Every structure is written in structure tokens, then in C-alpha cells.
Image: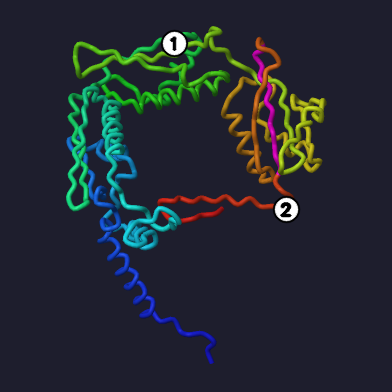
Amino acid sequence: MKAYKPFKYSELKSIAILLFIIVLIQACSSTKYIPDYQAIVKKVTIDSVDAKFEEQAYNYVQKDIRPSSSFSINVPLYNLFNTKDGRYKTTDIKPFGTPPAILDSTLVEISRNQIQKFLNGKGYFQAKVTADIKVKDKKAEVKFKAQPGPASYINKLSDSIATAYIKTVYHTQKPSFTHLHEGMQYDSDSLSYEREQINRVMKENGYFYFLRPYVNFDVIETADVKKVDLRLNITNPPTGDHQQYYIGNTHMLIAPGPDGFPDSTRKLLSKDTLNGIIYTDLSKRYRRNPIVRYDFLKQGELYDIRNENLTYDRLYELNVFKNVRVEYFRRDSTSKKINPIILLTPQKVMSNRVEGEVPFNGGTVGFT
């Protein structure tokens, strides 16, 4: 005799059909839950934007006024669980689905302004964007219309770099990363990318204190409205030329336990230096050699952020530390040596780390 009922596909099918009908009914009635002075955005369009930029431009429409897809069940689900007495709830909101896109003129204006800035950043310096809103039966349609004007292209590239060796490093490394070239359409994203890459290259060549704000660009108008000259500037700090820094002694410091470091840590530091590393294990749990072999910030070497990142990665991969932090200090303001402090916080004994990822827009949860 069977101790369970046989699975009936017809029962599951009936439940699915019933749920679909309920959701469909809710989908058709969103407007009845809002006051007469509100409207639900059913359609957003962007007109007169180059086809290659349409999708990117739409990303600048504020999410709260973007209508859901016609085939999405998010709004119907929200209606099903978050309405009461013919109105949307204002308290005790259930985390199911997403609310409908309620028309908000402030968000429309923000979107219009952001789309216009986006077009300016793509070389349409004369671009103007207007917004038109049509409302009928508490349903709204928002239309953004662009007047982009002519696109501008880079006529001439030049640079002004204050520190001579930085100029050499930049021009040596530039072919491997740059997106900028004469004749291309002006693109502010390419300028941002150039700035990021310059910052990376400087940090790989000893310039520990180099910062992104030292890199900026001048856009210079020409007689031709469709052409601009572009000048890269890498400025110096107030103290003079940028300086390269070398690695001094490294402190590797392990906390007593998962709760971190006590206030008295400084008094407990070891004073013994071996191969440029001062190792202090306050937990008394780890042997020196298996830990220090993953310090890639070697005494006497030029600072290179890649070695810092490699140190982070290898120490985390040991799976015995829940937190790894690298800090630096100089013994005096004139020294060209920076001394790393690698702070390691142990995991609980016999514990396993669980890393979770929750992409809210996808509705899935993953663990590793």
C-alpha cells in the first residue's frame, strides 16, 4: 500500500491557470488603486536620438517612471499583495513584485536633463531635449524629443604633463590602453577611461600618492563646429613633482580572534625583522612561513598596486582570514619609502565562509 498520494499533473495545471487568471485581473486594474490626481506611466519613448545611443539614453530615464514590460508579472503580484480597500497600502508592504510606475514630473525633468547631458557627453554639445507628457484615464505617456545638433569629432590631440618622467611613462604605456585618437567622435566615457588607466599605470610605477583629480582634459573649440581639439593635462601636487616610492619594512599583524584588534595592539608588536617583514601573530595559531610567503610587497621594490592586489588575493584564498586590510605609513615626510601594514583578522575556528549573491531584479539567490 502506498503511503503517499500520486502526483496529479492536472491539479498543478489547474492551480497555475487560477494563479494566472488572478494575476491577469490584477494587471488590468492598477489605475483603480491610485487617486484621480495620479497617473501610471504606460509608455516612455525617446525620439530623434542616433540608433546606436538609444538604449544607453533610455538608461537615464529614472527607474521609478519606467513602465514594466507588458509580459511582466511584477506589477500584478504587487497589486495582489499590497492593496487594501481599493487603494495601495502605505504600511506593511509585502516584498512581492514591484509597484507600478507613478508619473512624477520631477523625475521626468531629472530624466530629461540626464538624457541631454548624456548627448552632450557623446559630442552633441548643442543638444537640447524636451519632455512631453500626455495623460488620459489615469494613464500617462512620456515622450522625450531630442534636437541633437551636429556631432563633434576630435581634430587634434595634445598633452601638458608637468612631471617629465610621468610624461615618459604615459607615452610608453599609452598604446596599450588608450581609446582616444584623432578623427573619433568626442566621447566623455573615453576620457573617463583614459583617466582611470592613467591612474592605474601611475600606481603600477611607484606613484603611490597619485590621484585621479590630477588628470583632466581641456576641450578646445575650433573654427569648425564639428571639430574640437583635446588636451590632456596631468598636473602636479602643491609640493612639486610627483614622487616614486619604494617598499620599506612590512608589518604582518594577525588579530587575536574574529573580533579584531584590541586598543593595546601597538604595545604588542614584535620587533624582530626577517627579510624586511615584522611578523606578529596575536592569535598564536599560525606559523610564520606559510603566511609571509603571500606578502608580495617586497622590501626595496618600487611600489606596484598589482603586488598589493596579489597580496590581498592570495591571503584571502588561504580561507583562514575573514578580513584582510593593507595600510601604509611613512616614518617622516621626506622619506621615499612607504611601510605596509597587513592587518589580518582570523575566521572563527572550524568555520566555513558562505558568500551569497542576491540580484534583486532577477529574483534568484546564489551561494558559493
Question: Callout 1: few (<14), some (14-19), or many (20+) C-alpha neighbours within 10 Å?
Answer: some
Give me the C-alpha separation between circle 2 and circle 1. 54 Å
Residue plotted at (29% across, 46% down): 66
> Is residue 226 at all visible to an observer of this figure?
yes
Whole-percent x and y of residue 361? 40, 51
Q: Nearer the viewer, residue 61 or 232?
A: 61
- The residue indicated by pointer 1 is 161
Task: Quarter of the image for the N terminus: give it.
Answer: bottom right
Which residue: 34% across, 77% down? Answer: 14
What residue type is disc 1 on? Ile
Q: Is residue 229 above or below residue 325?
A: above
- Where is residue 210? Give x, y as percent: 53, 18
Q: Is residue 344 magenta?
A: yes
Question: How many numbered markers are drawn?
Answer: 2
Q: Which mark is residue 350?
A: 2
Q: Which residue of the protein is positioned furthest toward the top in this rendering?
A: 240
Q: Is residue 286 magenta?
A: no
The correct choice, above or below, for 108 with respect to 12 in the image is above
Question: Closer to the N terminus: mark 2 or mark 1?
Answer: 1
- Over which residues does the magenta segment extend? 335-346
Circles 2 and 1, Cβ within 8 Å, touching? The answer is: no
